[in-house]
Amino acid sequence: QSVLTQPPSASGTPGQRVTISCSGSSSNIGSNYVYWYQQLPGTAPKLLIYRNNQRPSGVPDRFSGSKSGTSASLAISGLRSEDEADYYCAAWDDSLSGRDVVFGGGTKLTVL
Amino acid sequence: EVQLVESGGGLVQPGGSLKLSCAASGFTFSGSAMHWVRQASGKGLEWVGRIRSKANSYATAYAASVKGRFTISRDDSKNTAYLQMNSLKTEDTAVYYCTRLSLSTGLDYWGQGTLVTVSS
């Protein structure tokens, strides 16, 4: 069981807007930044969003992130076929054992 | 250009050991914390552990699932991080990624991963 909770799947048609949620707790999302990663089949994860809503250079502005309380969301607008991938949220968790990185279980996005 | 290249994966029997390497280039390796993340086939990402820089006393931390069995180290003169895995279990079978921690952008660059298979 992952510490952060994501829906296992999401889907949309080309051009549509899709959102993926990520739910955590006060020890992770509630008190730390959220990061989003895109993983295309057979490849390593790629940083998509950092510090809740910042995009690394090269990431299209179709991708946006937001955070409220202990939850976060990734929105993809103008959906394209190449967006079909697995998406993971991540955050630091201030647990009793220290400061670890925790991930969501991942959301498989299908472009219909 | 930042590059991280993992190596050392392979097939090992339960109870065995394996040492992974992560060769880094394109950034100041000595000043960066390095993390290891793994992914079992068809599963999600799982944080394994990290090692901080010399300025932070090379402090290490591990996930509960590997604590006491795995050890992360680094050789700044070789720009390389290591993951020593002992007492391997079948559930350790996964692709292992090394990733760099940037204070501004988080775990921003990832290697291509190396596959570790624990099976008899």
Image: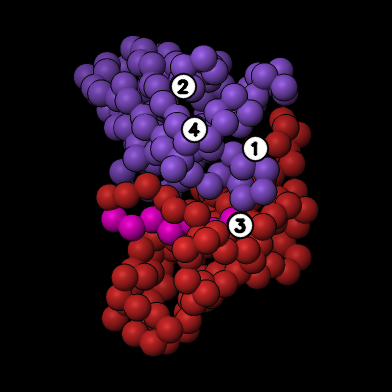
Chain colours: A red, B purple
Q: Is residue B24 above or below residue A74?
A: above
Residue at the spot of label 4: B36
Q: Considering the image in quadrants, where does the C terminus of chain A appear?
A: bottom left
User: In the image, what residue type sits under mark 3?
Assistant: Tyr
Structural crowding at the residue carrying mark 2, measured as other residues with C-alpha within 10 Å and reported as few (<14), some (14–19) or many (≥20): many
Residue at the spot of label 3: A50
Secondary structure of residue under mark 4: strand
Number of the front mark, 2 or 1: 2
Number of the front mark, 3 or 4: 3
The residue range painted magenta reads A35-41
Residue at the spot of label 2: B80
User: Which quarter of the picture shows residue A80?
Assistant: bottom left
Secondary structure of residue under mark 3: loop
- Evaluate whether label 3 is on the same chain as label 1: yes
Residues at circles 4 and 2 in contact by the CB criterion of under 8 Å: no
Number of the front mark, 3 or 1: 3
Q: Is residue A11 above or below residue A15?
A: above
Structural crowding at the residue carrying mark 3, measured as other residues with C-alpha within 10 Å and reported as few (<14), some (14–19) or many (≥20): many
On residue A100, which mark appears? Answer: 1
Secondary structure of residue under mark 1: strand
User: In the image, what residue type sits under mark 2?
Assistant: Thr
Which residue occupies 72% across, 62% down?
A: A70
- Evaluate whether label 1 is on the same chain as label 4: no
Magenta segment main secondary structure: strand
